[in-house]
Every structure is written in C-alpha cells, then in structure tokens.
Amino acid sequence: MFGYMGKLLRVNLTTSDIKIEDLDFEMAKKFVGGRGLGTKILMDEIDPTIDALSPENKIIFINGPMSGTPTPTGGRYMVVTKSPLSGTIASSNSGGTWGARLKYAGFDGIIVEGKSEKPVYLEINESNIQIKDASNVWGKYVSETTDILAKPGNNVLTIGPAGEKLSKMAAIMNEKDRAAGRSGVGAVMGSKNLKAIVTSGKLKPELANAEELKVVVKDANKKIRENGVTGQGLPTYGTAVLVNIINANGIMPVNNFQEGVFEHAEDISGETLAEKYLVRKDPCHRCPIGCGRYCKTDKVEGGGPEYETIWAFGSDCGVKDLEKVIEANYWCNQLGLDTISAGSTLAAAMELYEQGDITDADFDGVKLEFGNEDSIVHWTKKMGLREDFGDKLADGSYRLCESYGKPELSMSVKKLEIPAYDPRGVQGHGLQYATSNRGGCHVRGYMISPEILALPEKLERLELDGKEVWVKIFQDLTAFIDSSGLCLFTSFAIGAQEYADMFNSIVGTNWTADDVLKAGERIYNLEKQFNIAAGITPEEDTLPPRLLNDPMPSGPTEGHVHHLDKLLPKYYEVRGWDETGAPTPEKLKELGL
C-alpha cells in the first residue's frame, strides 16, 4: 500500500477500547485522504443532525498520502468533525510537524468516539497506544501542557482552557503555536475530556516510485522558490505581507467591516513586524516557503501573528498598536482560540457598544470600543477563560449579536466569521465565502490569488463574468490539496498537474490534472451532502446584509456592494446543483457518491 500506512486507530473514550483497523485502500484513493477521507468516514459513522458537543459526535485526526513524504510542505493534517459553531462539516487544517509524525507513528488517522469520565490524553508510539490520566495538565495553558508532556522524539497536540470550557471558537494546537483553528474543533475535543494526543515513531510510508518522486519534487520546489509570492513575499514578510496590498485595494476590514481602508495599515504591516518584532522564521515540516513567524515583544514571545490575526485584532477592532496585536495572538495560542473568530467577535462587540446595545455596566472597567488597544488583550483572556462578559463572547459573534437582536452585525457566514477581505471589492472571493461548506472561510478557494495577486492570471476583482467557474475550480483544487497533506500556499506556484505527478509517484496511480480536480469535486459534493443532512438550509449560502446592501463608503472600492444575487444561481448551475444548492442525482452518480 503505497503512500498510506494502511492503518486507522479507533479509540472509544467511553469504554476505553482501542482498535487498530485496516485502511480501505480503494476508498482512500477515491477520497484521497485528509479532508476527503475524514469526511467520508464521518458521514458513514454519525448522524449529521446530532449535537456537535455530544458523545455521539466523533472527531477524526487524519493526514494525507503526501504527509510525511519528501513533498514540499508535506506535514499537514486535518481535524474532521461536526462543528459546534456552525453546525456544518468541520475540517480544520494545521501545519507544523504533527501530521507527519502521526504517519511516522504508523497511522493514517485517529477516530475518537465517546466521552471519557475524567480528563485523559492519548500516547501513541507505533503499536503502543495508551489512554492516560490528564488531571495534571487539565486547566493548563497550551505551552505548559506541551512542556509537561513533551519528550525527545515526540510531538504534542493539545487544547487549552478555551477547549476545556467548550468555547465554540476553540482551536486545537500542536507544537504550541500551530493551530487547527477554525470551526470550534477544540470544543469537540474538550467535550470528550480529551486534553492531548502525543505521538512518536520512526515508521515511514512506502513510495510507489521514489526516483520519480525526486524529479517531480525538485521541479515543484524550483517553481515555488522562483515564484514572487512563495519565493519572495511570504519568506520575507510572512502572510502579513498582505496588509498593505489588501489595504491598497480598499478591502481591508475596518471597525467590523464598516470601512475598507485603514489609515494605520503601515503600523501593523508585515514590514513593520519584520523590522521591530521578528526573531526568526518558523517553517513547517519540509517547507521551502517558511512563512511562519516567531516574534517577541517586551511582554511575550512565540509563534505568529499571521495576517489573519493582524487584521482581526488590528484594523477590524480599530487598533494600530502591533505589540497589542502580538499579545492578543499569544493569548489565543495559550488559551487555544481561533484568532479570526476571536478578533471578529471583539469587533462585533465594539459595534454593539457603539450602538448602545452593550453598556459600560457589561465591562469590568475595560471598554470594548473601537481603538481601545488594551481591550483586545484583556477580553481575549476573559473570552478564553469564560470569565465575566467573556463568557458571552466565547461562543462567537453570531450568538453574541443575536442575543441583542442584531444578528446582522455578525460578519459571518453560517455562523463562522469571515476572514480579512471585504467581499464588496472581490466578487469571486465573496461568492466563495457564501458557498464554502464550513461557513465563512478564505482557504476553501482562495480567490484572492487571481483577483488581487494575479495568480495564475489576473482577474478584474469587481467583474462578475466567469467568476462562478473560477470559484468552482479553486474550491475543487483546494479540496484535493487539503486531502493530500500539503499546504494550500503551494498552489501559488504549482497547479493540478504537479499535484497529480506527486500523487502518482507516491501512490502508484496514473492520475491527470482532470482526475485531481474530479477528486476535489467529489469531496466538495460529499461535504455539501453532509451539510444538507445536518439541516443547513439554502438561505445560509449568503453574506452579511451589510456587504450585500451597504455600498463601501470610501477608498478604491467606494460605492460597491457584493452581487451575490447574480453570481449564486450561475454557481449552482456550474456545480450541477439544483436551484436550492443541492447536488442533483445525476451529479452524485457522476461522482460515485
């Protein structure tokens, strides 16, 4: 069995049963691995209507056939479960080295089911698997837990207090500051009283054609290093290289998406981060890009912040102090919080305060108001610990705004907060937000690549023609990449054919670029089936009313709204879905679903 280890680990925390199961190789190839295979297993094993935080939900940690191989960025893994934040399928991606180390421990994935009566963690060393008492690390921060459980040669994945306290925006952290961040996957882990998973081992997957793989990997690495984004921008300034670029296009969310240009963008830019706070680059496993940052202020040091963290705690909250943003990022990593949802929730609270819905009486002296730099650190801690008003913040912006009768102030899709690009100025990317299977998400089809970065070609960002086709292609390709075990950033420089060549050398297939996209389409449609079964309605394929109805007030995108009403029917048609956004029987048959 080439590329895969051929084994799945199943752990029932209710009964303490541990089973090692054979991987169905044909099913694995059909759904690739990672996101795709994890979704297939979850779809087969749970009722999509269950409460995401009940013992009936399962959580799957799964890598791809390229994880743990010599491929560029081949160290990623996915966490697949039902989301407690959105109610949709959740498949959250993380880098670092844990995904590769899971494979070195001998497994393609871990299926965790049931609920332990007391806090536990898993220790996995090849065929030696143990469920251990976690009472000594329960309640501790991510770095403390990691330091206590870490030994030479092992890797630690853990939740922080936010996951233990079932915050619906809780992340799962590995190697202290790498995050499977979105959709509240950390809360599912916490609901099972599972604090951590520690892996070690020295096994390696067998490759179908190791010599051929050397050739295709050399070619892929060459293209990655010669590309302007992956070879220059990201290595030099990290993902925060986007701050000035996005701001210059008038799509930088400011004050909860009320505006699109931040006058203090330079103060929170990647250039400023590199000049004042960068200690070193912090690359993931076998990564030729090295976009990860390790930064230090007078108060904190650690991994990050990423661009998505900088805009969420920075411009979206009206904050220009980069040190405070770095501190907020640090506490998100320590507590195990998704930085996008956390910062966006604070921004929504600030607008509620601005409108008089939240009053001074709700706070303990630190007001959540736009531009209040101390508030982002203070309330991030409170949110992660569910203390005081932080308890109300901990379940995300939609539930917060809904509790005040103003759900429209939540800048979210399917209750998942949307990332750092105002859809009014990027029509294709806005369509991707609305149709993303896990809710407001930028990495399910990164249309910023053609609409802003001109990769693989330049698309006019405000035009509508053909955007539905591009969105489908990007979503399908991304589904394959997520399932393979590679990083999405490789797609700035290489395309479907290069992915097919690497997959063939590892697994022993003869796939073409079209086969790669077809596999991605199969995965995307399977996710859609899960969401329909879970009760996600067609009305949820939408954007916040502000972005559809209120023209951008100023800047390069002034006067524009998002034209979802024109794009969505065309997208459904291109996908082979009916007018409600459901895959037709013909499409499901075509994809073997």
Image (spheres, rainbow, N blue to C red):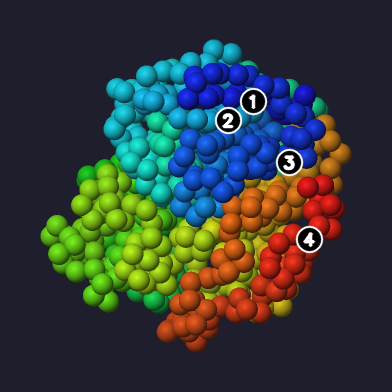
Against 169, is 175 above or below?
above
* Nearest-to-viewer mark from 4 and 3: 4
Q: Is residue 575 left or right of residue 366?
A: right
**Could you tell me the amino acid type at mark 4?**
Thr
In three-dimensional space, the C-alpha distance between marks 3 and 2, rounded to whole angstroms, equals 17 Å
* Nearest-to-viewer mark from 3 and 2: 2
Residue for badge 2? 111
Residue at 16% over, 67% down: 360
Residue for badge 4? 584
In three-dimensional space, the C-alpha distance between marks 3 and 1, rounded to whole angstroms, equals 15 Å
Q: Quadrant of residue 73?
A: top right
Q: Position of residue 164 (x, y in %)?
A: 35, 37
**Could you tell me the amino acid type at mark 1?**
Leu
In three-dimensional space, the C-alpha distance between marks 2 and 4, rounded to whole angstroms, equals 31 Å
**Could you tell me the amino acid type at mark 3?**
Phe
Q: Quadrant of residue 364?
A: bottom left
Q: Residues within 10 Å of mark 1 (few under 14, many from 20)?
A: many
Residue for badge 1? 8
Upstream in sequence: badge 2 or badge 4: 2
